[in-house]
Amino acid sequence: MTRVALYLPFPKGMTGAPRRTIALAEALRRQHLHVGIFGNPQTPFVQEAEKRGFEIVRFEDTRDLEVPYSSVRSFSALQLVKYLGSIARNNIEFARRARAWKADKIWIRSLRGFAFSGLGARLAGCPVTLDLDYEPAGRGLMAALSFLSLSLSRQVVLQYGAAAREIFGSRLTRTFDKRLYPLIPGIEIETIEKRAVPSSTRSDEKVIIVQVGSISRRKNQLFSLEVFSEAVNNLKGVEAEIHFIGDIHDLPYKEKMLLFARDQKIESHVRFLGWRENSLGLVVNSDVMLMPSYNEGVPNAVQEAMLLGVPVVASTAGGLPEILDNGRTGWSVDLSEKDVWAQVLQKLIEDAALRSAVGAAATAFARDHFSMDEWGVKYSAFFKSS
């Protein structure tokens, strides 16, 4: 049986990437692959994998590596040398663990993950499948990493068709075209439906707008507030609230949101719910989801909302235009068109029949295109090939 090691660097709670990695592990196991999870047993991600019966290979990333891209770009020469030394040590340790586990193939999430383990995987003699969601376009060291990852990976799996050119640019995309595979991720449809238990305390007197994601500029919750404020000001005879589900990644950003809500006198309509284990129950209890992110791949939260029949209004980032057909399965609207966002949101708040029709179409689309089994069959082919 082919032994496949999955590696996700520095997972933060059971958010999008960790949940998607667990879903992939389940899909591969159903295709009769032996899956091992490389990671720190103290993280919720690895603990969840262990709970589901996956073999765990203890691998703790070098802590010096846990810094954002922006910090690396501002490193001094000495800091950069130390950082590259930490990357080298991480790769050497990864190679040792991969050999000891007798891995046949290695799956790595993100360019960052490739930097930390890609050379180690090749040192261990294992072909690499690199999985990419959203990645910032690379310059300098990141451009070099992009070239290295494309050169040394057997396959690069992308979540949407336009991702390759957005991440690597036209020249690298043309050069490595035969290694690039767009593949919309699957979701655990039955599990999601079982866990999405509506709250009995839900009031039908208010229309609930929801956004899921860490409070940060990237997720652009302030834009949601601005659109919500404009839509609410034009409502007649309908009450609405907007709920934000997610931890606070950027406290000053949240303070800016609170100030805006007070200035617009909508604070009584705004709720910050924090990170919730039962986020699916909150989503299925809502009427509309907003996702005005500056950058995305194909977000779990949007796929789940579509499956649960919650209409989504999202930005045109990443793969969102590929899964949202305006007016039918949802809306994908450019962030420059704030008035369109407000008009669509107002219409959805006022028109329950429209919400129901779009929600039903979104559910049908999700069932047809987000199948975990179909995703698993296509993905497993990368590991079963020689």
Image: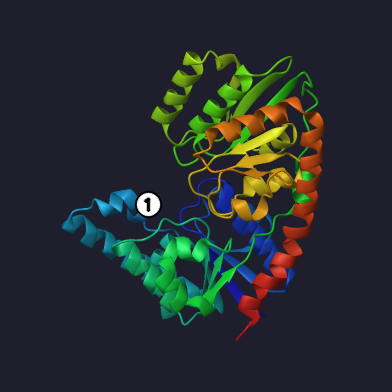
Say if 126 sits above or below 372 in the image.
Answer: below
Question: Which residue is situated farthest in the bottom direction here?
Answer: 386
Q: In this rendering, does residue 96 appear at all?
A: no
Question: Which residue is situated farthest in the left direction here?
Answer: 77
Quadrant of res 228: top right
> Looking at this view, is 112 or 306 the one in front?
306
Q: Position of residue 182 (x, y in %)?
A: 59, 67
Residue in view at x 45 percent, y 27 percent: 254
> Looking at this view, is 314 or 114 the one in front?
314
Residue in view at x 52 percent, y 26 percent: 226
Quadrant of res 124: bottom left
* The C terminus, quarter of image: bottom right
Q: Position of residue 126 (x, y in %)?
A: 50, 80
Say if 165 sits above or below 95 in the image.
Answer: above
Quadrant of res 305: top right
Q: Is residue 212 left or right of residue 11?
A: right
- Number of numbered callouts drawn: 1
Q: Position of residue 133 (x, y in %)?
A: 53, 58
> Looking at this view, is 146 or 23 the one in front?
146
Q: Is residue 324 left or right of residue 150?
A: right
Q: Position of residue 250 (x, y in %)?
A: 42, 34
Write down the residue under mark 1.
Answer: 66
SS under mark 1: loop
Q: Label 1: few (<14), some or many (≥20) within 10 Å?
A: few
* The N terminus, quarter of image: bottom right
